[in-house]
Amino acid sequence: MKKSLILTIAMLVSGNVLAATDHYILRDGDAVRHLKVTKIKDDYTVDANVDYESAADSTHCSESISGKAKSTGETELLMKKHSESEASFCELKIKLSPNGAKIEESKDCDTFTASKCHFSSGDKELVKIK
């Protein structure tokens, strides 16, 4: 019993050493953007979501997208997600910095989101949560 418990704990600890997850967040007016980047060895997984709620006109939406990403540079990631309803791809280009991240989305990401919800952060940087 003791050996099983020690082996289980050792496996959990060793698995956590190989994985790293960073969270980024940006509140911009009525929109809140969240980005989670997980790196396991040389593989990246990206989860991005946006929540929008306007008190002025009662508009609200909540969208998310996730998938595997490729490193396109030392501080850049590219995630492509195929639309199930159309023959298009949503591309998220993520530029990482020591303190944050910026997200650019392709035009075809409109098939994944409602009118006010966009994954792109524009010129603003999502702040890295430490």
Image (tube, helix red, strand yellow):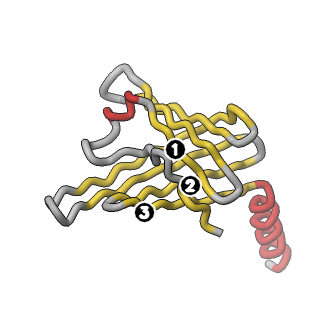
Residue lying farthest to the left in this orientation: 57
Residue wearing tag 1: 103
**SS assignment at label 3:** strand
Badge 3, how many Cα within 10 Å: few under 14, some, many 20+?
some
Residue wearing tag 3: 27
Residue 99: image location, x then y, percent? 66, 59
Q: Which quadrant of the view contains residue 60?
A: bottom left
Q: Is residue 29 left or right of residue 1?
A: left
Q: Is residue 3 left or right of residue 93?
A: right
Viewer-closest of 10 and 86: 86
- The mark total stands at 3
> Can you tell which mark lies on residue 36?
2
Badge 1, how many Cα within 10 Å: few under 14, some, many 20+?
many
Residue at 72% of width from left, 34% of height from top?
A: 73
Residue 30 against residue 110 in the figure, above or below: below
Q: Answer with mark 3 or mark 1, whichever residue precedes in sequence.
A: 3
Q: How far is disc 2 from disc 3 in space, using C-alphas?
A: 15 Å
Residue 15: image location, x then y, percent? 76, 59
Residue 2 against residue 51 in the figure, above or below: below
**SS assignment at label 2:** strand
**SS assignment at label 1:** strand
Q: Are marks 2 and 3 in contact (CB under 8 Å)?
A: no
Residue at 52% of width from left, 44% of height from top?
A: 103
Tell me which amino acid carries mark 1: Ile
Residue at 39% of width from left, 53% of height from top?
A: 50
Residue at 58% of width from left, 38% of height from top?
A: 68
